[in-house]
Amino acid sequence: MEVVDYGLGDLDRVGTEIVVYENNDRYCAKELVLFGGQTCPEHRHPPFDDYPGKRETFRVRWGEVYLYVEDESADDSVESSADSDSPRSVDPPMREEHYTASEEIHLEPGEQYTIPPDTRHWFVAGEDGAVISEFSSPSFDEKDVFTDPKIDRMAGSY
Amino acid sequence: MEVVDYGLGDLDRVGTEIVVYENNDRYCAKELVLFGGQTCPEHRHPPFDDYPGKRETFRVRWGEVYLYVEDESADDSVESSADSDSPRSVDPPMREEHYTASEEIHLEPGEQYTIPPDTRHWFVAGEDGAVISEFSSPSFDEKDVFTDPKIDRMAGSY
C-alpha cells in the first residue's frame, strides 16, 4: 500500500492510502482509502505527448465521500478563486486558496462519478472514512498537477 | 444486472451474471458473479478495425475461480483439441470439444490474472460461487468469439 501525504506532513488531514491492482498501458484499477475527514488535495490530470490525460471513475464501496469538481461553466481564467458561490458541505483542510473546485458530488456506497481529463478535483471522506474503487485510463502520477504549489506528489509518498 | 446463458439454456451450468459499472471508450469495469460450479464458456476478444482487442484483468473478490487460458506455447493451428496434456482440476460443463484452453490458474480472493487480447479462455467458480472484479480496456461483447459455434452471446442475455 502506498501512503501519500503530498509532502505536507499532515497525513491525518491531507493524504491518501492507495492499493494499485493494475496499471498498464491501456487501463488502471486501484483502491483508494481515506481516513475519516482525510482529504485528497485538488489536482488535475493534464494531457501530455500523445496521451489525452487520465479519465477516472470513482465508485464508493464503503463510507461516504464529498467530491468537488471544477465547474465547467465557470471562468477558467480565475484559477485561484472558487468556481461559484454554492456552499460546500465540507471545508478544505488547509491552505484554502488552493481549493477552487466547488461543484459538490456526494457519493455513498454503490454510487460513482466519472471525472474528465484535465479537470480540477479534490475529495474528502466522511467522518468514518471511505474506500473508493478507482477505474481509469492509465495512471501517470508524476504528471498530476496540484493546485497548491507546495505539494510534491512524488516526495510525499512512502 | 445482465444474466447471460449464452443461448445454451442451461444457466445453472453455463452462464455469467454481470454488473457493468463503467464502459467507455478508454476503459471498462464490471463485477462478474458466478453460481457455484457455473462456467463462463471459452471465448476470446479479437482485434477489429483500429482496436487491438480487449485486455482484461480478473481479480477475485469472493469465492474461488479456476481460470483456463490458452497456452501460448501450444500449436494454435489445432483449435479443437486441448493445448496440452496437463490435467485440469475442473471439467468443462458440456460440449467438451469446445473447451481447448488448458493452462490452469487457480484464483482466490485478492488474487488476479491479466489475459492478453485474442487469447482463448474460460473459467468456472468453485462450489460456493464467486465474485470477480473485471478491469479492462473497453468491452465490445458483440465482437467476442466463442469456441463453441452453438453459442450466441447476444441472444443469450436477458
Image (tube, coloured by chain):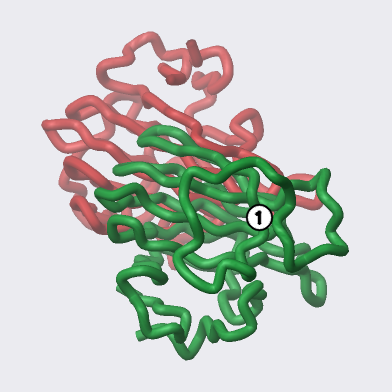
Chain colours: A red, B green
Q: Nearer the viewer, residue B39 or A13?
A: B39
Q: Nearer the viewer, residue A25 or B90?
A: B90
| Left or right relative to B94: residue B61 | left
| Left or right relative to A138: residue A91 | left
| Left or right relative to A9: residue B70 | right
> Residue B114: in sight, yes or no?
yes
Question: Looking at the figure, which quarter contains the C terminus of chain B?
Answer: bottom left
Q: Nearer the viewer, residue A82 or A145?
A: A145
Say if A127 sits above or below B144 in the image.
above
Residue at image point 36% right, 42% down: B64
- The image position of residue B13, as x and y in percent, is 36, 69
- The image position of residue B1, as x and y in percent, is 30, 73
What residue is shown with label 1? B101
> Residue A138 is drawn in which quadrant?
top right
Identify which amino acid the numbered label 1 is placed on. Ala
Residue at image point 29% right, 52% down: B129
Check disc 1 and report its element: helix, strand or loop: loop
| Left or right relative to A80: residue A155 | right
Q: Which chain does tag 1 point to?
A: B
Say if A72 sits above or below A131 in the image.
below
- The image position of residue B39, as x and y in percent, is 43, 62
Residue at image point 63% right, 70% down: B98
How many marks do you count on the picture? Answer: 1
Residue lying farthest to the left in this orientation: A127
Residue at image point 64% right, 28% down: A142
Q: Nearer the viewer, residue A97 or A38?
A: A38
- The image position of residue A147, as x and y in percent, is 50, 35
